Image (tube, rainbow, N blue to C red):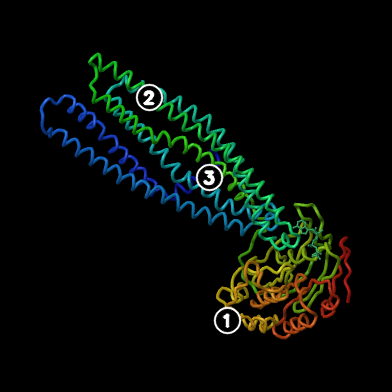
Amino acid sequence: MKALKTLNPYFWKHKLLLFYGFIFIILSNFFNIYKVPFIGDSVNQIAEYKGSGFNPKILVNVGIIIGSSLLTGFFTFMMRQTIIVASRRIEYELKNKIYSHYQEISITDYKKTTIGDLLNRLSEDVVAIRMYLGPGVMYVANLIVLVSITTFYMLKTDVCMTLWTLIPLPILSFLIYRVSSVISRKSKITQKSQSAISTFVTDSFSGIRVVKFFAKEKFIEKNYSDKVRDYQDKSLDLAKTEAYFFTIITFVIGLLNVAILFIGGQKYISGQMNVGTIAEFFTYINILIFPFSMLGWVTSINQRADASMSRVNEFLDMKSEIVNKSSEISMITGDIEFKNVSYTYPNTGIKALDNLSFKIEAGKSLAIMGKTGSGKSTIALLLSRLLDPDEGEILIDGKNLKDHNLKNYRNYIGIIPQESYLFSDTIENNIGFALEKPSHKLVEEAAKIADVHNNIQGFKNKYETMVGERGVMLSGGQKQRICIARALIKQPKILIFDDSLSALDTETEENILKNIDEKINNTTNIIITHRESSAIRADKVLHLTPLNELELAK
Ligand SMILES: Nc1ncnc2c1ncn2[C@@H]1O[C@H](COP(=O)(O)OP(=O)(O)OP(=O)(O)O)[C@@H](O)[C@H]1O
């Protein structure tokens, strides 16, 4: 249960709610046990009553029993209202923490995880942790308080019988401990299998077009069904082990009843005990049955939560390689210099750039050409500081990029990625994404520069048109131009086209570049392209080869 210790600060934060919850646990258990001697007394009254009429003492007892039961119910309700509420709040905070960490980690770390894995951590794992925070903590605290109060009352009634009935409990605890270790191991295996399903589903949905192009629906279905079967087998195996809990508990409870009957019966025969006391002991054991049954379940959910927490911790411990060191807000004019920059992708060991140097003044344009895999997109990633160079430095306005305030710098750069990614939202919101509160006028202006305004006007809902998931409702060229408009709306000082004019005909491309020259002042343009016609307009052309041999032309 080491991993769950990371939750201690959360418990501390919600200490007041949890403290009240604990008080309610004590009160609910106290009133639950308080009524038991009155049950025993009532049984004795009935057994000893010789008269034929109403026994007022029983009526008083009944009143106390009903009153205690009502108070037990009320405090149980309050106990849930405090402890379960605290667990829901912690769940909310944990979900936000995991999600915001996903935004922070560097892009090379994203490759280490998958979307399915993220969904799993946000849903399955956090739910498992919340089960520990809520029911897990509540039932364990409840059991400790209940056993303490019950033992006190039982000892007060009959020491010998108490010892005989409570002796099997440590044996029960030991058995539970043994079974829980097996459950913990099997839970981890089951969670891994669940994660594999989520990854597979998100992956095959994203690539649904490819699946259909290749008529691979049956193949995908079979793969899915194999994964679900694997999950089912593992879950059933886990459920089987969990079932041992209840079997063991029921058996032990049976033994306890026999012990009460045997010892209580002997004492009754020898005149040392009355029937009321025997009835009291049966009631105590019946009260203990439910929490002890829950102990099995709680142990298993706590084990599962521990497995989930260690997965979440493993992820939260990932530190971003991109660190912002400055809080200075400054204007960026757009001078760029690469000085002996090298970069190797850590996950594959592929050297994408080797000792690359070039310079471009603010307001000028640079076309980057080269074979596939020659490192063009890597330059775009380094320039937008999604990656940091291993060697050499990138100077922006004469200052190392690492020393610029990251958020401030990113406000000045606009990047149109190779893959046109749109959010499943309206065109208006997709274009305005870069700004806090974009006005429609700004959105329209950006769309005009990107030469997509007329297209949008042709749609039934114009700028309110929903683009569908990842922009599936739009053509490749429309998506590219909306991405261009999204980058232009913030009037960037450095504009990077990462092969993002490829889906456009040369005339449209020409229009867009001309519009940018005229409407966006002094922007440094980096145009990554395979087309000579796009490169020709640039002030400089950088030719890269996969061996990273640099040729500066013009
Ligand atoms: N995320 C990554 N992880 C590991 N290796 C990568 C990653 N991205 C790119 N690479 C490798 O780095 C090298 C340069 O890739 P890059 O994407 O910069 O090339 P490119 O010139 O933009 O190619 P293209 O013209 O095909 O887009 C390639 O050999 C590629 O396999």
The image quarter containing residue 260 is top left
Ligand 1 located in image quadrant: bottom right
In the structure shown, which secondary structural element does the residue marked by tag 1 occupy? helix
| Structural distance between the alpha carbons of marks 2 and 1 | 75 Å
In the structure shown, which secondary structural element does the residue marked by tag 3 occupy? helix
Q: Is residue 426 above or below residue 239?
A: below
Left or right relative to 270: residue 5? right
Do labels 1 and 3 touch, CB within 8 Å?
no
Amino acid type, label 1:
His
Do labels 3 and 2 touch, CB within 8 Å?
no
- What residue is disc 3 on? 6
The image quarter containing residue 398 is bottom right
Of callouts 1 and 3, the N-terminal one: 3
Quadrant where the image shows the C terminus: bottom right
Left or right relative to 183: residue 216? right
Residue found at x 62% / y 72%: 467
Residue sitting at the far top: 270
Q: Position of residue 209 (x, y in %)?
A: 71, 63
Q: Nearer the viewer, mark 1 or mark 3?
A: 1
Amino acid type, label 2:
Leu
| Structural distance between the alpha carbons of marks 1 and 3 | 46 Å
- What residue is disc 1 on? 440
| Disc marking residue 256 | 2
Q: Residues within 10 Å of mark 2 (few under 14, many from 20)?
A: many
In the structure shown, which secondary structural element does the residue marked by tag 2 occupy? helix
Q: Position of residue 56 (x, y in %)?
A: 12, 34
